[in-house]
Image: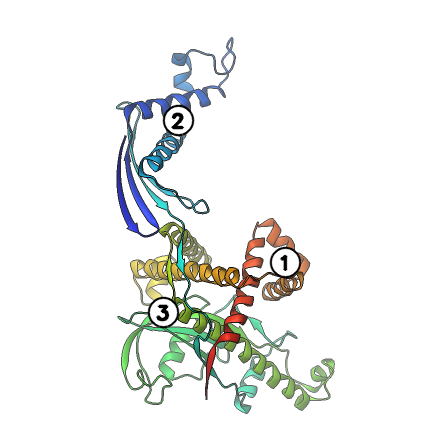
């Protein structure tokens, strides 16, 4: 067996493995015996018929699949021992079969081996952040009232449609060529500036667009104001405020005296929505700053699977609208390669941040209480517009209870980082 090693990064090793003829022969022999046991011939017990009589009945594709699995499993284990590699047990290696031939008894494949993550957590106390001041104007109240439809909820995350005027959105803007993760902004759709508003309308959460933008002279980021840049814009989150048609009878059904009373409630709901968005934006800042202070290395395997899953999910979403993934990329100013690279970057960042969050949780010796898990379950149920019990059953059915735990951990760590942060108020 010949093994060639390439260290792709501190946590990923690529092995090219050329198997010996004896390994290939053994793999095919064992695969044949396994399949032969399932074939029944008159006068013979399963697995005891002469090979010459059984060979024509063994499906070739099944034989090769089983042989490949046996050959890779055994030779990969031997290669790890030879190279003195201890892979990450929580992440699967990825295998690409290059050659498999039973006649010449040849097999060759590459395997990307994940190593355990390497994390050096930076100082997470005193992270510098900016906190915008929250104000609600009469114009905002009137605009939101126009959007109210058929629901009593005063605020809910929007996941089933694109951006509409009046929505509260958190967007990430990254200048082409600049390093880092871009900058996050909380805005009311329709109230930024015309060029950005037009591009933002219709985008869905996690949608990305490449475009050229000229920022107004009055733009809040002074180093961007008045300049034209090629940017990548990502919609991080979207929230809408919804209520039924506005009239006195509806206001009274909500135990308010009249429309004016209801307007007060609307103002409060907008404020809460902005507070929620502000918390999300602050969390983004905190994690970005912590990332800058830390060293985080992860295997490619950890984030590639996530990126591929999101590409498949996006393709499925587009198929429902009779569109292809290529059309989706073009509509957002990207080639397929650019779209794939954008998802790769996002997936890698997601994994690295998740590991940092867990490191802080462990470093602070935190624990989750039953109440904290119940609170998070209630929040998730609200997002899916179902009852908490139904949400819990869905998580169990999909083996996704870990997602509930991680969300609760993330919220607790974010609150801690915020508590320790050095915040600068921004008007």
Point out the tag, 2 or 3, that comes first from the N-terminus. 2
> Helix, strand, or loop for circle 3?
loop
Question: In the displayed structure, would residue 239 be above or below residue 372?
Answer: below
- Residue identified by numbered label 1: 391
Mark 2 near mark 3, Cβ–Cβ under 8 Å?
Answer: no
Location of residue 80 in the rendering, given as x and y in whole percent from the top left corner: 35, 37
Viewer-nearest residue: 354 or 72: 354
Q: Earlier in the sequence, mark 1 or mark 3?
A: 3
Residue bearing mark 3: 181
Q: Residue at x 61, y 54 (%)?
A: 394
Query: How far apart, in angstroms, are the residues tagged by discs 2 and 1?
Result: 43 Å
Q: Residue at the location (28% across, 72% down)? A: 178
Q: CA distance from mark 2 to mark 3?
A: 48 Å
Q: Which disc number belongs to residue 63?
A: 2
Q: Quadrant of residue 292?
A: bottom left
When asked about the image quadrant of residue 211, the answer is bottom left
- Residue 154 quadrant: bottom right
């Amino acid at each position: 067996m010949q093994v060639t090693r390439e260290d792709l990064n501190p946590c990923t090793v690529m092995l090219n493995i050329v198997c010996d003829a004896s390994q290939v022969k053994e793999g095919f022999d064992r695969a044949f015996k396994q399949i032969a046991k399932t074939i029944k011939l008159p006068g013979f017990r399963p697995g005891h018929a002469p090979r010459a009589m059984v060979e024509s009945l063994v499906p070739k594709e099944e034989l090769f699949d089983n042989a490949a699995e046996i050959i890779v499993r055994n030779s990969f284990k031997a290669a790890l021992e030879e190279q003195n590699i201890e892979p990450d047990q929580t992440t699967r290696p990825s295998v690409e079969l290059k050659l498999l031939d039973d006649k010449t008894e040849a097999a060759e494949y590459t395997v990307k081996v994940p190593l355990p993550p390497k994390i050096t957590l930076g100082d997470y106390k005193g992270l510098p952040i900016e906190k915008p001041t929250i104000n609600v104007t009469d114009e905002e109240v009137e605009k939101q009232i126009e959007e109210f439809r058929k629901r009593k909820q005063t605020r809910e995350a929007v996941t089933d449609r694109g951006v509409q005027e009046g929505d509260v959105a958190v967007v990430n803007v990254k200048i082409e060529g600049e390093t880092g993760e871009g900058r996050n902004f909380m805005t009311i759709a329709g109230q930024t500036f015309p060029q950005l508003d037009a591009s933002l309308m219709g985008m869905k959460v996690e949608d990305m667009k490449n475009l050229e933008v000229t920022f107004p002279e009055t733009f809040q980021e002074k180093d961007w104001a008045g300049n034209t840049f090629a940017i990548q814009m990502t919609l991080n989150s979207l929230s809408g405020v919804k209520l039924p048609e506005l009239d006195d009878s509806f206001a009274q059904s909500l135990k308010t005296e009249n429309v004016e009373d209801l307007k007060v409630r609307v103002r409060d709901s907008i404020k809460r929505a902005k507070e929620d968005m502000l918390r999300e934006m602050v969390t983004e800042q905190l994690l970005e700053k912590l990332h800058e202070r830390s060293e985080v290395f992860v295997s490619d395997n950890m984030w590639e699977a996530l990126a591929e899953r999101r590409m498949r999910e996006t393709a499925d979403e587009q198929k429902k609208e009779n569109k292809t993934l290529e059309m989706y990329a073009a509509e957002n100013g990207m080639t397929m390669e650019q779209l794939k690279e954008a998802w790769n970057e996002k997936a890698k960042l997601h994994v690295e941040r998740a590991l940092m969050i867990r490191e802080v949780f462990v470093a602070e010796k935190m624990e989750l209480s039953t109440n904290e898990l119940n609170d998070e379950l209630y929040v998730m149920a609200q997002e899916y517009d179902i009852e908490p019990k139904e949400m819990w059953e869905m998580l169990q059915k999909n083996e996704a209870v870990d997602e509930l735990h991680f969300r609760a951990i993330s919220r607790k760590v974010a609150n801690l980082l915020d508590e320790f942060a050095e915040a600068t108020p921004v008007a």
